[in-house]
Image (spheres, rainbow, N blue to C red):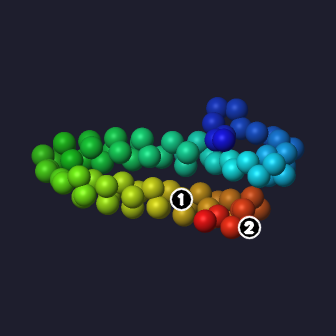
Amino acid sequence: MKGSNMPCTAEAVDVFRKANVLIAPAIAAGAGGVAAGEIEVLRESNSMQWSAEDFESRLQEALKQTYEKALKAANDFGYQKESPE
């Protein structure tokens, strides 16, 4: 579940956590599509040719960075799962 336009209350988050429902901020949950679009615009604006493997590598790195930032924020605010892997 992602928290987007109407984020969950703290009480709702507790219910989700007790039910083992993973929640993520909208910025993290929607990062794949946004990152793919940004990479494509970068490629087009620079008239670059990338292989599928290069694109995949860049996308994976962008998603990894987003995941790490979301995990840090969750930890900073006390909402980190015991085992995020």
Q: Is residue 10 visible?
A: no
Q: Quadrant of the C terminus?
A: bottom right
Foreground: 19 or 25?
Answer: 19
Q: Are marks 2 and 1 in contact (CB under 8 Å)?
A: no
The label on residue 55 is none
The label on residue 82 is 2
Residue at the front extreme?
19
Q: Quadrant of residue 2?
A: top right
Local crowd at mark 1 within 10 Å, few (<14), some, or many (≥20)?
some
Q: Is residue 85 visible?
A: yes
Q: Quadrant of residue 73?
A: bottom right
The label on residue 67 is 1
Q: Residue at image x 64%, y 64%?
A: 84
Q: Position of residue 29 (x, y in %)?
A: 55, 45
Q: Position of residue 26 (x, y in %)?
A: 59, 42
Q: Position of residue 9 (x, y in %)?
A: 81, 40
Q: Which of labels 2 and 1 is toward the front?
A: 2
Q: Position of residue 31 (x, y in %)?
A: 48, 46
Disc tally is: 2
Q: Residue at image x 45%, y 56%?
A: 63
Q: Helix or strand or loop: what does disc 1 sit on?
A: helix
Q: Quadrant of the N terminus?
A: top right
Q: Residue at image x 71%, y 62%?
A: 80
Residue 65 in the figure: left or right of residue 14: left
Disc 2 versus disc 1: distance between alpha carbons?
Answer: 15 Å
Q: Residue at image x 81%, y 48%?
A: 19
Q: Quadrant of residue 4?
A: top right
Residue 83 in the figure: left or right of residue 70: right
Q: Helix or strand or loop: what does disc 2 sit on?
A: loop
The amino acid beneath tag 2 is Glu
Local crowd at mark 2 within 10 Å, few (<14), some, or many (≥20)?
few
